[in-house]
Image (cartoon, rainbow, N blue to C red):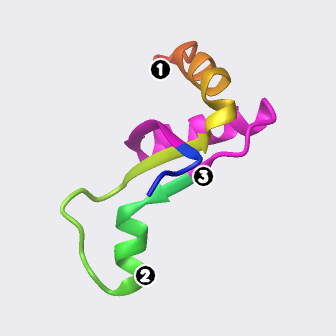
Amino acid sequence: MESDYIKVFGGNVNESNRVEQLLQENDISPIVKSESESARLAGFGTPLPHISEIYVHKDEEAKALKIISQLDWEA
């Protein structure tokens, strides 16, 4: 099944929150997928806690990747 959404980032929750906020500030509506949160809500555990993935619509992929590539992770 083909999706209109593309994964543009994967990382820990803190990094993902930073990327999500930056994308929103640039008028991109990201979808954040957290396996650990989904598992917790369902009553299960997960081998990779606190890992999130960020997806954007394929029409916004290039803009999102450019924004993410310019992030200063040391700040």
Q: Nearer the viewer, residue 29 or 47?
A: 29
Mark 3 lies on residue? 31
| Residue 45 sits in quarter | bottom left
Q: How far apart in space, not on screen, are marks 1 and 2 (Cα)? A: 30 Å
Which mark identifies residue 73?
1
Q: State the extent of the magenta-drawn residues as a range.
A: 6-31
Give the residue drawn at x 62%, y 41%. Answer: 20
Amino acid under disc 1: Trp
**Image height of 72 relative to 54, above or below:** above
Amino acid under disc 2: Leu
* Residue 9 on the magenta segment: yes
Q: Are there few (<14), some (14-19), or many (20+) residues within 10 Å of tag 1? A: few
Left or right: 41 in relation to 57: left
Mark 2 lies on residue? 41
Tell me if residue 15 can be seen: yes
Amino acid under disc 3: Ile
Q: Residue furthest bottom?
A: 43
* Lower sequence index among marks 3 and 2: 3
Give the residue drawn at x 81%, y 35%. Answer: 27
Q: Nearer the viewer, residue 50 or 62?
A: 62
As helix, strand or loop, the secondary structure at mark 2 comes to helix
Q: How far apart in space, not on screen, are marks 1 and 3 (Cα)? A: 21 Å
